[in-house]
Image (cartoon, grey):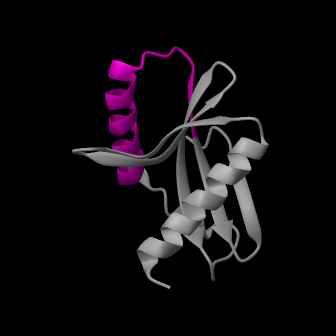
């Protein structure tokens, strides 16, 4: 399976999981000039920016480890861009990691 298709499948699984947790998906693949956010969700009064890392052959921790300093900067930039037109006081950055071991949701990852 192509890398992009693996990523899309992971995002679909993550969105389905978040919905089951009671969250509402606001945006998928939100793009700006300097970054992309895989999923933007509403968790009660909090807007959640979600980075999804799919590593079908990986171990627990492989996906989360891939969200380094530069990626975090891009996510923060994209989040500021989104918040400029959708003001919100409470925000959170989560990572969802999908590996051979299953799905792991890391709330307030950074």
Side (left or right) of 56 relative to 38: right
In the rendered image, residue 92, in percent from the top left (x then y), is placed at: 57, 31
Query: Which residue shows up at 76% across the image and 35% down it?
Result: 22
In the rendered image, residue 85, in percent from the top left (x then y), is placed at: 34, 20
Determine whether 37 is above or below 93 in the image: below
Quick check: is 2 in the magenta stretch? no
Determine whether 67 is above or below 75 in the image: below
Query: Which residue shows up at 55% across the image and 56% down it?
Result: 52
Using the rendered view, name the quadrant where residue 78 is placed: top left
Using the rendered view, name the quadrant where residue 56 is placed: bottom right
Query: Which residue shows up at 69% across the image and 45% down it?
Result: 18
Determine whether 30 is above or below 62 in the image: above
Side (left or right) of 103 relative to 34: right
| The magenta segment | 70-93
In the rendered image, residue 24, in percent from the top left (x then y), is placed at: 64, 34
Using the rendered view, name the quadrant where residue 62 is placed: bottom right
In the rendered image, residue 8, in percent from the top left (x then y), is placed at: 50, 65
Is 49 in front, or is 5?
5
Please, what is the dominant secondary structure of the magenta stretch?
Answer: helix
Is 48 in front, or is 17?
17
């Amino acid at each position: 399976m192509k890398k992009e298709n693996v990523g899309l499948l992971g995002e679909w699984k993550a969105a389905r999981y978040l919905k089951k947790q009671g969250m509402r998906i606001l945006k998928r693949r939100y793009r700006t000039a300097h970054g992309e956010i895989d999923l933007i969700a509403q968790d009660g009064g909090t807007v959640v920016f979600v980075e999804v890392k799919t590593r079908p052959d990986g171990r627990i921790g492989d996906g989360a480890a891939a969200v380094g300093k530069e990626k975090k900067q891009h996510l923060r930039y994209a989040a500021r861009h989104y918040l400029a037109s959708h003001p919100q006081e409470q925000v959170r950055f989560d990572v969802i990691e999908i590996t051979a071991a299953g799905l792991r949701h890391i709330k307030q990852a950074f």
